[in-house]
Image (cartoon, rainbow, N blue to C red):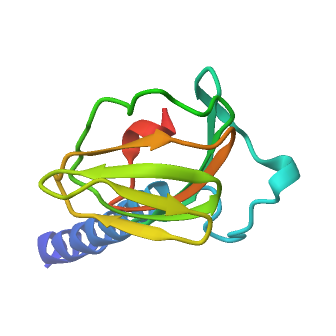
Amino acid sequence: MKSQTFIKLFIVLFLSFIVLLQNKIRRALHFKFEHMPVVHADQTTKTIVKEGVARSLIHGANLMMVVIDFSNGPWLEPEPPHHHVHEQTTYVAEGELFFFCEDEPKVHLKTGDMFFVPSNKKHTIQVLSKTLKLIDSFNPIREEFLT
């Protein structure tokens, strides 16, 4: 009888531990904005990607939005093409660019235009204006942008 009570108590404690661990993991997977999903522009941390290119971002567990500011245009050449597993949508908030996507013709885009990049499709841009602001969304989130 005592061994059955001990086993039941052990199972209850073990299951409680598992539930607590799951909750901790779930919270750890969410960014610090889980309870207050607001980032004010004047309080945003900007990451300098390279000279003339800065980004700021917000994300949840599965979706990331990135604002990229280019102040080094116009470019004479496009950046080298790259690809990633993430699906990407981009809104041109300000400026002009050429958008290049694998197996597609070059496209001239300006303020208000948008584009979509499927997973693992090579793509790049060429900045045409002095400044450019892009708003990218990624799914899943770009973990490498968090470091």
* Above or below, 58 relative to 83: below
Query: Image quadrant of residue 125?
Result: top left
- Residue at 69 percent across and 42 percent down: it is 131
Query: Image quadrant of residue 111?
Result: bottom right
Q: Is residue 68 visible?
A: yes
For this view, does 86 lie left or right of residue 43? left
- Residue at 68 percent across and 69 percent down: it is 37
Residue 68 position in % (x across, y down): 59, 46
Q: Nearer the viewer, residue 53 or 111?
A: 111
Residue 128 position in % (x across, y down): 55, 42
Residue 3 position in % (x across, y down): 13, 69
Residue at the limit of the structure toward the top, as seen here: 51
- Residue at 52 percent across and 30 percent down: it is 75
Query: Image quadrant of residue 112?
Result: bottom right
Q: Is residue 30 visible?
A: no
Q: Nearer the viewer, residue 111 or 60?
A: 111
